[in-house]
Amino acid sequence: MYIIFFKRSHGTRVLFMRLGAGFACSFHKMTMTKMTISFPSLFLFLSLSSLSAQDTIRITLEQTIYESNVHSVDALVAKNEFCSSYWEYRTYQAELLPEVVFDGTLPYYSRSYNPFQNTDGTYTYVGNDYSRLDAAISIHQNIPWTGGKLSVESSLQRLDQFGDHSTTQYMAIPAAITLEQPIFGFNRVRWLQKIEPVKYKEAKARLVSRMENVTVLAINYYFNLLLGEINLNIAVQNYKNTERLYTIAEAKRNIGQISENDLLQLKISCLKAEASVTEAQSSLKASMFQLRSFLGYHENIILIPSIPKSLDNFRLNYDEVLVLAMENSSFTQEIRRRQLEASRDVSKAKSERWNANLFLSFGLSGQDSHIPELFDNLRNNQIVNLGIRVPILDWGKGKGKVKMAESNREVIQSRIEKEKIDFNQNIFLQVENFNNQSKQLNIAEETDRVARKRYETSIEAFILGKIDVLNLNDAQASKDEARRKYIEEIYRLWSYYYQIRSVTLYDFVNKQNLYADYERIVK
């Protein structure tokens, strides 16, 4: 294409031109020719001084997709959200494993006066001056089947009594087994076992789906830039053609071969073409800024897109796509999670109406003033506690909570059924759009070829005086529209394909499921 820069020099209008494969190629080695013409000064592109300071990168659609998945902010956000879900899942897994805990008081000292009742009923204050050191190591294990907790603890305590009768005593519990068990209560761990694996599967599928959505967005930005370049090419070429035709028309008008109206119509076309160049340039800059920002490129980088090749001509089967979507998509896991969470809330509301807890502890303890003798005379150390809480009159509050939870579960189920219908319908429409798009693209490609040929023929016919300006303008408009339509149809084909990939998480070209490097992401 030609990059053109107009300026005034001593009252003469000068045109600089050069031929290139894109609007910004080979800026560092620019060769220019000069010619004198008679039309208004115009700034069509960036000034030559600024072009020399910019780097040019030719970029393909495949490169854009790759860069968007690696460097774009949207991709980084999706990966960080997955990391959060990953550590949430790891926290759940840790709850199923034994937990080792150390507790210690190093030391505790107290000097105080406490009331003491004498045998005659009177009170006096007795001084108490002592310190205590204790340490314990315990192992705790949740019991998912019952919702209880089993603990094993070993502890050692030293008590120093100060004053006139100072003493030192030790107490050791070599081993104590404790069971805390809710009876008919809410089993939180059991529900975690049901919900958390589903949530993690949902997070993994959602990550892949969001990366595909990032690709769809990258395709949109890429084709916006490509269409912006096409529009600038069209505008520059149309401006050149209208100027050339206007010069010819002026000569014809001087010899009376065309009317004054046709000449003025051509002048209007020149002015419109001039305005179109400026508009196309501004639009191109905006599209380039958008893609550069999305991919993380520096503002001095100039991106030159190329028209991507079409996808292989293949059709998708709706039933197969639907099966893949139901198997792989995050939507399926989301539905399952929401159903489980609703059932969990019902179970929790029921368990809160009344509750009983059992606490049982059994162990051996010994005490002495010397550590070696602690274990010579071990004694039983037992605690049994059964607590029960039953509301006698709550005015239906507990029953109301249960009914609310059950009603919410029914509402969620109804919404899920509607969402399933919408999900299936959306997939059907996406498959239909994709299957029809290849034909639409072929039609647009042929229309583009015919429209360009018609425009070239119309220019020759106008020069020979066989058609008027209106027919010439119509041919030009048809040519421009056909070219834009062709680019748009390529965009739709790629967009439809990646939209289907985002819900099925399946690569239909290579015939394999889509995955992410989950381990690398969380490192």
Image: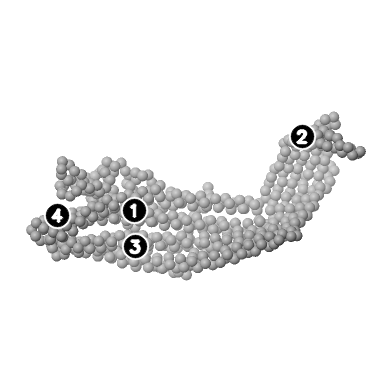
Residue 363 image point, x, y percent: 79, 48
- Residue carrying label 4: 247
Cα–Cα span, label 2 and label 4: 108 Å
Q: Check disc 4 and report its element: helix, strand or loop.
A: helix
Mark 1, other Cα within 10 Å: few <14 / some 14–19 / many ≥20: many
Residue sitting nearer the eye, 449 or 13: 13
* Sooner in the amino-acid sequence: mark 1 or mark 4: 1
Instruction: Tell me, yes or no, whether the two marked residues, 3 and 4, touch with CB atoms within 8 Å.
Output: no
* Sooner in the amino-acid sequence: mark 1 or mark 3: 1
- Residue carrying label 2: 110
Residue 124 image point, x, y percent: 86, 35
Mark 3, other Cα within 10 Å: few <14 / some 14–19 / many ≥20: many
3 or 2: mark nearer the eye:
2
2 or 1: mark nearer the eye:
2
Q: Tell me if residue 503 can be seen.
A: yes
* Sooner in the amino-acid sequence: mark 3 or mark 2: 2
Numbered tag placed on residue 489 in the rendering: 3
